Image: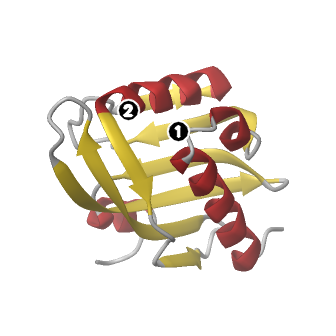
Amino acid sequence: MTSVEEAAELGREVLAAVNNRDWDAALRFYAADAVWEHNLGLGSPAEGVYRGHSGLRRLWLTVGEAWQFHFDEPDEVRELEDGRFLTLGTFHITGASSGAPAETRYGMVATLDEGRIVRHQFFNDRSMALAAAGLPE
């Protein structure tokens, strides 16, 4: 079983790898058959379900082509009653072609098995992440 402290540390390490665009380092934290649900219901260009390491890499490369981004230290990591983990935080983006900056408050719900992420639900909308976690806003 993973503690909230271990999940928070894992999350920090994943975000550091993603911030550095070190996809191989980030993938070490995901099971080979991991599923990433990206912005489902938000209508974003990369919205979809990505499976396995090749799917996650494809997502990250697609997003990285359109945006420069940096995730701040998470604001909050909480263990849910069913063993999943909710992370709330902020990331900063700049359009790769437009140069337009923006700040987004995100939420994600992660399911871990044997210390690796097996399911990752990511939302650019905290209220949707809270709903996915079964929590009120």
- Decide: is 107 above or below 14: below
- The residue indicated by pointer 1 is 36
Quadrant location, the C terminus: bottom left
Label 2, label 1: how far apart the Cα atoms are: 14 Å
Mark 2 and mark 1 lie on one chain; the one further toward the N terminus is 1
Left or right: 53 with respect to 107? right
Marking on residue 63: 2
Looking at the picture, which amino acid does disc 1 mark? Trp
Dot 2: element: helix
Judge the density around disc 1: few (<14), some (14-19), many (≥20) Cα neighbours within 10 Å: many
- Decide: is 10 above or below 21: below
Q: How is the image coloured?
A: secondary structure
Dot 1: element: strand
Q: Name the residue nearer the viewer: 52 or 99.
A: 99
x, y percentage for residue 130? 37, 68
Q: Residue at coordinates 29% horizontally, 50% vertically from top-left?
A: 93
- Numbered circles on residues, count: 2
x, y percentage for residue 32? 75, 30
Looking at the rendering, which quadrant does residue 68 occupy? top left
Looking at the rendering, which quadrant does residue 96 occupy? top left
Q: Residue at coordinates 33% horizontally, 30% vertically from top-left?
A: 46
